[in-house]
Amino acid sequence: MNVSDSERVATSLAGKGYEITRDEKAADVVLINTCSVREKAEQKLYSRVGRIRHSDGPKPVVGVLGCVAQLEGETLFKKIEGIDFVLGTKAVGRISQAIEHSLENGAGYSDLGEREPDYDWNVADAQRHSPYVAFVPIIEGCNKFCTYCIVPFSRGREVSLTASTIIRNVLELRRQGVKEIHLIGQNVNSYRPLSDAGLEGFAGATPFAKLLRAVAGTGIERIKFNTSFPRDFHPDIVDAIEENENLCNWVHLPVQSGSDKVLRAMRRGHTIQSYFKKIDRLKSSTRDISLSTDIIVGFPGETDSDFLDSVKMVEYCGFDSAYIFKYSPRPGTPAYEMNDDIAPETKAERFLALESVFRKRQTEVLQRYRSSTLQVLAEKSSAKSATDLTGHSTCHKVVNFKGSKELLGNVVNVSIFDIKSNSLFGELC
Ligand code: SF4
């Protein structure tokens, strides 16, 4: 979501005549888009601003955007010296006003206001992270209030874009030659547009599955979506994937824990049995769907037995990939008020133990790709070799293979001969 926000900020500024540079030293204005999901966001911001302020040469205007800006607001001016303006997560459409105000009046401007009703969600060709892959926001914010998470406070409540806006956006991207789109949001499958005059039939139990079918109908080559919320993951989503070849075979479904007691304390809204039911449906699909997840170890009150439930869950699910985190309290969340009673050494031990179980299981499940042929979007030259290309498969694996640059932007068939935990290696068929 933050990459997508940055792309739209760059689009809006370029449209107003600003020149975008990645060279911090050459910039008149430096924008720092912050994320507070990971630990130490503020310390990182502090050192980044300090580095800019203490570098030689003219001092640029420094603006802070994103979640830390939204949560801290004007207090950032007191906490971190050298910030000129602060722009909240929904105020990014007014970036040029913030810059102009700072250039004219100096430091101290902040805007934490709401998004404009006519906010432009499009990203210009030149500002996308890839010419072939584009992010398409479909919902922002979150209503779930998991006890460890700051997102509902930094991004506000769920607001879905209308299906007609999304479809128009996808059709335009297709026209521009984009091959793969990622429908994005904190919880894409909680998609529920309030009204949609442009397209009928988005009410009912499974509006997200309906949206998937409508987006598939645009004929864009590949569609991925991220992130899904387990409680709202309806089997109709799998039906939609099975019906449409251009809906890719990858689902990211964060489970967070294998213990019902911990899931309750996290206020996740799902039990481990209900999660397994969804995994069973995904695994029984006619498509070979690759599964990824997020897991937290060492949440307050997690006993050895709770942790063992997470180990069993990892063994059962057979994820293609998993992001495992040690719990750390985030100020402002309900879990921050809980007793963080798991010792750092225990968290570290559980992290290593779970990672080792996951790696072992992952080695088994990834073997199914050996000697298989995957459809890979050739996205860029490999950083390691001028004769190699790299891209993603429909199952969202990074695949490296020998190939010439003329193939960039094409979907090619690659036969897999080697498997590493984070990437696959193959040769063109
Ligand atoms: S679903 Fe939970 S973890 Fe995900 S963004 Fe919402 S509150 Fe955070």
Image (cartoon, rainbow, N blue to C red):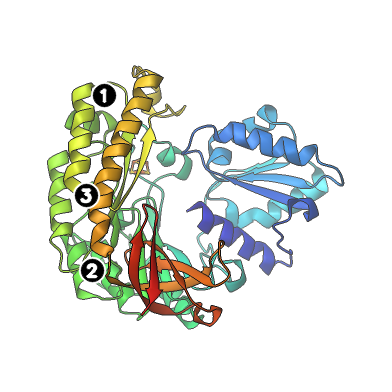
Amino acid found under the numbered disc labelled 2: Ile
User: Looking at this view, is 286 or 311 the one in front?
Assistant: 311
Front position in the image: 118 or 137? 137
Front position in the image: 356 or 282? 356
Q: Amino acid at mark 3?
A: Gly
Q: CA distance from mark 3 to mark 2?
A: 20 Å
* Disc 3 to disc 1: CB gap under 8 Å: no
Dot placed on the residue nearer the N-terminal end, 2 or 1: 2
What residue sits 66% from the left and 33% below the top?
A: 46
Q: Is residue 195 above or below residue 176?
A: above
Tell me if mark 1 has few (under 14), some (14-19) or many (20+) residues whose alpha carbon lies within 10 angstroms of its own: many
Which residue reaches farthest front?
417
Q: Is residue 252 left or right of residue 65?
A: left
Task: Tell me, yes or no, if residue 161 can be seen here.
Answer: no
The answer for how far apart the CA atoms under marks 3 and 1 are is 22 Å
In the rendered image, which residue does mark 2 sit on? 241
Residue type at tag 1 = Glu
Residue 52 occupies quadrant: top right
Earlier-in-chain disc, 3 versus 1: 1
Q: Secondary structure at mark 3?
A: loop
Q: Nearer the viewer, mark 3 or mark 2?
A: 3
Residue at x-position 43% and y-position 44%: 156
Residue closer to the observer: 304 or 83: 304
Of pointers 3 and 2, the one earlier in the residue sequence: 2
